[in-house]
Image (tube, helix red, strand yellow):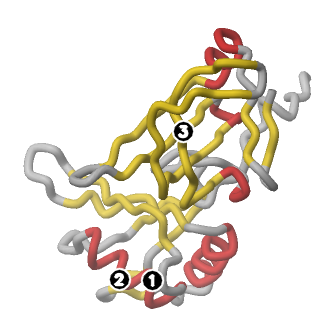
Amino acid sequence: MAIPSSEETPKPTPTVHVNNIPQTVTAKDLLTYLESAIGSSSIFALEIFSEHNNWKSRGTGRVQFETFEAKSKALTLSNDEKLLFKSHFLRLTDSKDDIVPRPYFTRNRLNNCTLHAGFPIGVDCMSVLETWEGVRSWVMPERNRLEFWVSMVVSVISLRFNLKILWSLLGIVLVIPNQMHFS
């Protein structure tokens, strides 16, 4: 029997499957209830599965927590049958897939960054054409992805790059002070 390498072994996620959701409940109702039971701002994303022909709830969904601690607390409450919501005990089980893919390590989730766009004019010098403040950046080597969210006056622009392609085409070196270094 082959032993999977560490790259093949799935990493735990902060996401759970939720069963026994009352059919009349909206995502906002479930979010409000779970945050009152687990903690304010403990949920990153939430979805309730529905029938597409009539949008009626299937009674199941997924919740992605901000932290593994919040997930653990939710699973414990579920196992102890303490998640009673509108006369239904919510049943939580582990999920291998996140609702919104994001960096596994929180150190790779950066907020309030500055993004400079331009072109190189030397080994350590760049001619900057545009600069944006307050940018959210996610570096996901486990998904070979680099993402930026740039807030504009009216909307948010998402920029998504494949790290392998960037490195092979540009020989890029990404340095984020006090965080990480990829080359």
- Check the image and report above or below for 161 versus 20: above
Residue located beneath label 1 in the image: 35
Answer few, some or many: residues within 10 Å of disc 3's Cα (few below 14, many 20 plus, some between 14 and 19): some
Answer few, some or many: residues within 10 Å of disc 1's Cα (few below 14, many 20 plus, some between 14 and 19): some
Q: In which quarter of the image is the N terminus?
A: top right
Amino acid at circle 3: His
Amino acid at circle 2: Thr
- Check the image and report above or below for 6 versus 94: above
Report x, y in % for residue 43: 48, 71
Which one is earlier in the sequence, the residue at label 2 or at label 3? Answer: 2
Q: In this view, does 55 lie to the left or right of 68?
A: left
Using the numbered discs, state the Cα–Cα distance from disc 1 to disc 2 in whole angstroms: 5 Å
Residue located beneath label 3 in the image: 116
At a point 44% along the width and 90% down the height, the residue shown is 36
| Residue nearest the observer in this picture, 35 or 125 | 125
Residue located beneath label 2 in the image: 32
Using the numbered discs, state the Cα–Cα distance from disc 3 to disc 1 in whole angstroms: 37 Å
Depth check, mark 3 against mark 1: the one in front is 3
Amino acid at circle 1: Glu
Q: In which quarter of the image is the C terminus?
A: top right
Circle on res. 76: none
Task: Say which quarter of the image contains residue 159.
Answer: top left
At a point 45% along the width and 83% down the height, the residue shown is 35
| Residue nearest the observer in this picture, 64 or 84 | 64
Q: Which residue lies furthest to the left in this view?
A: 54
At a point 62% along the width and 15% down the height, the residue shown is 165
Which one is earlier in the sequence, the residue at label 3 or at label 1? Answer: 1
Report x, y in % for residue 67: 64, 68
Numbered disc 2: secondary structure: helix
Answer few, some or many: residues within 10 Å of disc 2's Cα (few below 14, many 20 plus, some between 14 and 19): some
Numbered disc 1: secondary structure: helix
Contact between marks 1 and 2 (CB within 8 A): the answer is yes
